[in-house]
Image (tube, grey):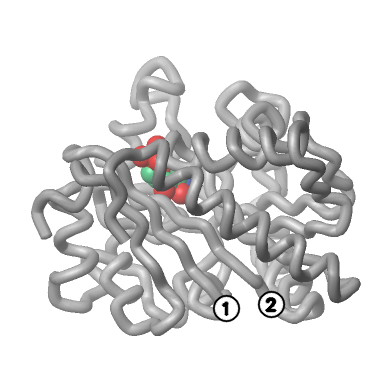
Amino acid sequence: SVYANQKEASLAVAARIAKLIRGKQAAGQQTVLGLATGVTPIGVYAELIRLHKEEGLSFKDVVTFNLDEYYPMKPDAAQSYVTFMNENLFDHIDIDKALVHIPDGTLAQDDVAAFCLDYERQIEELGGLDLQLLGIGRTGHIGFNEPGSAPNSGTRLVTLDDLTRRDASRDFGGKENVPTKAITMGVGTIFKAREIILMAWSAKKAPIVQKAVEGEISGEVPATFLQLSDSVEFVLDQGAASDL
Ligand code: GLP
């Protein structure tokens, strides 16, 4: 769907999440959400916070799995996705922090593979992700699945693309400070979600959105794999949709 602007699109996505949570609550079930970082979902999180504070939306029975984390990364670092999620969502809602999962950037390299398998196992034990939120990077990455990622890839340690590190350099005060690696859910992990919402705002994202939606399906632009799923919706503002 294409919305007039980012605000309207964000409100619509937040409303869908709220409806999902409330529906699950009515059935006495937990909601399992896959969450994303970056500037793109901030408006959705802001609206979820408002719905919590003003309209009684509770997150007590919501379980979350974040897509990715830089590696190595200390959770209390300003640039960590743990800090991002706390500041932009978790610190402002009634979520049970024991139900929050974010890839661990402090692991020893030898322990990463086992951690990643366990991340997948935990998602599966809960019955899978009800909904996965995604942004898109300028390399066409989803999560941190950079060009070259396989459609059936699982949660794993990856090397970040140079363009991705350049795009992140402002947060880190220079590209040389951006970690070279990250732990990310795989394309295959994302694919298993029952609903996938990829959001993109502004004309800056228009070229990569065009490739993702209309381009040849290829690991060179991992987001093109989403064309193979019936459960994906692209939620765009007019700028991001301007090359379609
Ligand atoms: C980062 C994240 C992605 C995100 C992308 C786009 O690399 N790992 O999950 O989708 O950047 O970021 P932004 O939303 O800030 O444009």
Q: x and y percent of residue 11 in the render?
A: 50, 44
Decide if residue 145 is in sight here. Answer: yes
Which residue position is annotated with label 2?
128
Q: Is residue 51 above or below residue 219?
A: above
Between 197 and 57, the one nearer to me in the picture: 57
Decide if residue 181 is in sight here. Answer: no
Q: Is residue 114 left or right of residue 174?
A: right
Residues tagged 1 and 2 counted as in contact (Cβ below 8 A) = yes
Disc 1 residue crowd, few under 14, some 14–19, many 20+, Cα 10 Å:
some
Residue type indicated by callout 2: Gly
Disc 2 residue crowd, few under 14, some 14–19, many 20+, Cα 10 Å:
many
Q: CA distance from mark 1 to mark 2?
A: 8 Å
At 9% from the left and 54% from the top, the residue drawn is 243
Q: Quadrant of the C terminus?
A: bottom left
Mark in the foreground, 1 or 2: 1
Q: Residue furthest front?
A: 55
Residue type indicated by callout 1: Arg
At 57% from the left and 59% from the top, the residue drawn is 16
Which residue position is annotated with label 1?
194
Is the residue indicated by label 1 positioned so its CB lies within 8 Å of ligand 1?
A: no
Element assignment for label 2 = loop
At 41% from the left and 15% from the top, the residue drawn is 173
Which quadrant of the structure image shows residue 7?
A: top left
Between 81 and 42, the one nearer to me in the picture: 42
Element assignment for label 1 = loop
